[in-house]
Image (spheres, rainbow, N blue to C red):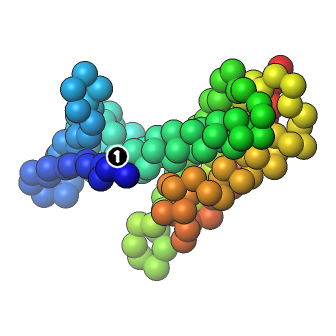
Amino acid sequence: MPVRNGSAEWKGKIREGGGTVSFGSGENAYQGSYGFGSRFEEATGTNPEELIGAAHAACFSMALSGNLGRAGFDPEVIQTQAAVHVEKVDGSWTITKVHLETQARVPGMDEQEFQEQAKAAKKNCPVSRALAGVAVDLTARLIS
């Protein structure tokens, strides 16, 4: 498996400064700004927690698609959101929880099988495994 890269640059003091994050290449490259305001307040820009959320949602969706395919089902669409919770723990900002919320249209699948496949995807996707020290919960809904 290839190594994947992301980068960041920060300039200045924590509150007044700012930075850029980037990842990807070619047409699909992403570069965005981040700062204290976009991380801990409501300013525009991105932040590390949003990027973790996007990565987790993407990883989970792909893992669920793979599980469904191996179980003999062809998903039409899987939509996932990841809410990353950040709180102060012992005086330090800490990611304390990720809530995955997914819905999928999977012709011919019953609810119980879908729930089992979704739980397995949550447990086994690489980003979930990387976040093993964080509580990850899941709401999964099969749509028709």
Disc 1 crowd, CA 10 A, few/some/many (<14, 14-19, 20+) = many
- The quarter holding residue 140 reads top right
Residue 50 makes an appearance in the image = yes
The residue under the point 41% across, 66% down is: 93
Image x and y of residue 68, in percent: 72, 38
Q: Which residue is mark 1?
A: 47
Relative height, residue 132 to residue 109 (above, below): below
The residue under the point 27% across, 36% down is: 24
Relative height, residue 106 to residue 102 (above, below): above
Of residue 84 and residue 67, the one placed in the foreground of this image is: 67
Relative height, residue 22 to residue 1 (above, below): above
**Residue that lies at the very extreme toward the left in this rendered image:** 12
Of residue 105 and residue 86, the one placed in the foreground of this image is: 105
The residue under the point 30% across, 53% down is: 3
Left or right? Give the position of 89 relative to 77.
Answer: left
Image x and y of residue 13, in percent: 13, 57
The residue under the point 39% across, 45% down is: 51
Amino acid identity at mark 1: Asn
Of residue 7 and residue 113, the one placed in the foreground of this image is: 113
- The quarter holding residue 94 reads bottom left
Quadrant of the snapshot with the C terminus? top right
